[in-house]
Image (cartoon, helix red, strand yellow):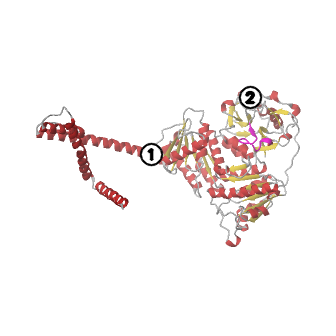
Amino acid sequence: MAQRHTATLALRLRYRFDNLMAGGTTALIGWFALACLAVVVPASTVLVWADRAAPATLSGRLAAVWVSVGQTLKIGGAVGSPLYVLASVALALVALLFVSTLVGLITTGINRRIMLLRRGHSTVLESGHTVLLGWSDQIFPVVGELVAANANQRRAAIAVLAPKDKVEMEEEIATSAAATGTGTGTGTGTTRIICRNGRTTDPAELARVSPRTAKAVLVLPPEGDTGDAQVVKTLLALGAAVPEGGGAVVVAAVRDTRSHLTARLAAGRGGHVLCVDDIIARLLVQTAREPGLSLVYQELLDFAGDEFYTAAARGLAGRTFGEALLAFTTSSVVGLLHADGAVALNPDPGTAIGPGDRIILISEDDDTAVPVDASSCVDEEAIVTARPRTAEAARLLLLGWNRRAPLLVEQLDRFVGPGSTLDVVSLADDVRTRAAGGVAGALGSLEVAFRSGDITDPGLLAKLDVPAYDSVIVIGETGHEPLPRAAAAPARAIDLGLAPETGTETDDRTLVTLLHLRAIGEAAGRELSLTTEMSDDGNRLLAPAREGADFIVSGRLISLLMTQISESPYLAAVFEELFEAEGNELHLKPVADYVRTDREVTFATLVESARRRRECAVGYRLRAEAATGPAYGVRLNPDKGQRVRFGEHDWLIVLAES
């Protein structure tokens, strides 16, 4: 009962206080004055009566109390005639009112400015900075890579504009930076990260991040079915905000191939637009053909390792490209950047280097691309003649179906040998799958068969005889209707639901499929050749697969590509050729086709052997270290004087024609 009475009393007191606060300004001032007097007058009385030097008379002590109260409340406390006292109190109250009003105005102005800054509506006054437009999970790897790229700069800035609360953006970026080790807080290293709130499709709000004075503008593709339309509108708004084009490099990405041409038109001549579906499909096919290639691209695109740079020809002008291959001991030459901006990857070794040309090479940093001749390190006796190899028929398995699958099937048909087969297992029914993959009827070397089924069902996977396939590709199931009850998967299949076009549910189903595939591989006592597509890099760390397995993480890969192009615009042409079916691309080829494996050889010997086959050697992969992180046997751009003893099953990484 006592507790109930206490609670009731507390509620009553709170209720009375609420009523008091709701009484308005006049009531609050009155009650506040009474409260002050109730405390100050008794306290002043005690102080006067306790003072040994206080007047002896009552009137004197009362006057002393009045002086103490006046000084405490800042209303003067003057002693004299009543009129004099009233005038002094009035003047004190006027002064107090004036000062209080002034303080209130200043405080209100400061608060308004602080709120404006917190909303992120102020204009960024920077030049030579990088602008990020839009918000998605891709922003975190982009920021991380830009911070790494700016590590050797004293003053760098990244301005982010998105329809999101400024403080939330700063907190999320800071959390991601701390988790990945790119820095602490929003001041990551020497790079300042500035967030602004606004619509990326409004030219007036775009001006908040000063795209006119930026060195690069990156338009990130938002999640959802309308993401590509948002990118196109943002590019149009950017053109309206900077009508003369400015000096910034514009890099954007769209997901659907049908939006690619529209986005390129919106970006203008100086813009670079990546098509996510096209690039991911090509990389999946390249990696499925040559396991380990995803690790090479990861190392090549990450600013933490070796990447593409250009170096002045200097003393190489007038000499041939073949001679330039051994002219850099600590860098790997792969092409030429001509004076007119044209890029030539792996040109004929007899191509003459012009006086205005620059050398495209892979190096640790731009200051490590120093010409030092390595031709003396070549061991002629170790070079062997390549054994002829013909494309053999392959048996392939594709688990899952999404918007990129038809592109993937088309690309596979260009590379596989005659008589190759592809079995497609998808949650969609046969009719819908065949309609989505209508290209199957026009294929040349590849015979495609469709089968309806849930790829997370271990019973279905067991019936497929997965170990009998030469290569298995797992992609996310998206955009399908649920199976009817009559055709539902067995009870033991894990029902994770159907994934939309974007989201983590796609990776959830992929993780379950990988778990069953691992069990199948262990039961068969063999290692499956597996290539997996994922959306979230965080889910890759959870994947139940062997160390060094091939994963194509679409979000992170596109982020790395966009960042590389924003820092070096000529790389747009380089990557375009690398990901095309025709032209030059990276390959993993048996090292035994180039040098003898019964002795130690220098990497310069491998470069020379590859040159004679019109190829550029850029690294190698050791099978003995294929399961050991973090490089998993991949060594890009080794020193040409380094001696290595290779095995029969090691690979040489070369840039060569498809």
Badge number at residue 316: 2
Q: Position of residue 632 (x, y in %)?
A: 74, 42
> Which quarter of the figure is the N terminus placed in?
bottom left
Name the image quarter holding residue 295: top right
Q: Nearer the viewer, residue 596 or 58?
A: 58
Q: Which residues are magenta?
A: 624-636
Amino acid type of the residue that numbered disc 1 sits on in the rendered structure: Arg
Which of label 1 and label 2 is nearer to you?
1
Give the crowd class for mark 1: few <14, some 14-19, many >=20 residues within 10 Å: some
Give the distance between the C-alpha atoms of the residues marked 1 and 2, in whole angstroms: 55 Å
Q: Which residue is mark 1?
A: 118
Is residue 515 visible to us here? yes
Q: Nearer the viewer, residue 592 or 122?
A: 592
Q: Residue at x 35, y 58 (%)?
A: 6
Amino acid type of the residue that numbered disc 2 sits on in the rendered structure: Leu
Side of 133 relative to 287 (left or right): left
